[in-house]
Image (cartoon, grey):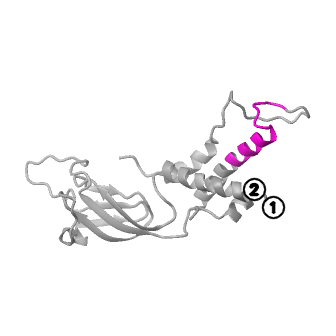
Amino acid sequence: MAIDTLSNVKDTLGVTGTDDDALLARLQMSADNYVSAFCGRTFLGGTFVEDHPGGAMVIFLRNYPVTGVTAVKVDATREFGAETVIDTDRYVLHPDRGVLECLDGSFVPSLPGWHIGPEHFPGAVRVTYTTATDEVPATVCQAYSQLIGHWYRQTKTHAATGQLNIGQAADGTSYPWGQSTGFKLPAGVLDLLKPFRVPAM
């Protein structure tokens, strides 16, 4: 499933007709992967299972807003049997940002004299949770279309120049891209996506 529909992408880019639909569909697949990797999350919604360190008091879930937490399991041995589900009164969910906060210290209980850090007990907390489907932010859709449009223009320019690295055609048509400057991603795409990145830990 794509971040946005082919029809919406074409409307945003002002592309009419169906001649380039196959090309645009391929570019959509690349853009889906790029946006997900850049932001460290998916925007398509569904059910997710993630493992996090047990020494933390706060866990940043990779996908948000969160519509519900099915279960939080804590197990330093990482076997996660049914008996490792912790009571819901031990934690609170901040759904808009996907933050899970332990109310009584670290998720793996700390004994007196222990000095455990947030990265200790790696993978000892398993969270199963859900996010809404079909609710991709409009800003992300705009960045997605801009990214596809950038790659689309690049491809069409290569085709128009016969795959040659020229700056101007014989008829006077100018091409602003070339090997000297590269095909850099537009800064506007990255600026639109940055607020949606998962915080670095």
The type of residue carrying mark 1 is Gly
Q: Position of residue 121 (x, y in %)?
A: 21, 51
Let me know if residue 158 is in the magenta part: yes
Give the CA separation, mark 1 to mark 2.
8 Å
Give the residue at x 31% y 64%: 127
Amino acid marked by disc 2 = Asp
Secondary structure of residue under mark 2: loop
**Which portion, as a residue range, is magenta?**
151-168
In the image, taking residue 112 as reference, residue 83 lies left or right, namely right
Q: Which mark is residue 20?
A: 2
Which residue bears the numbered disc 1?
A: 17
* Image point (58%, 50%), residue name: 192
Instruction: Check residue 97 in the rendering and tell me which mark sits there, or answer none.
Output: none
Residue 167 falls inside the magenta stretch: yes
Give x and y (percent) for residue 123: 26, 55
Q: Residues within 10 Å of mark 1 (few under 14, many from 20)?
A: few
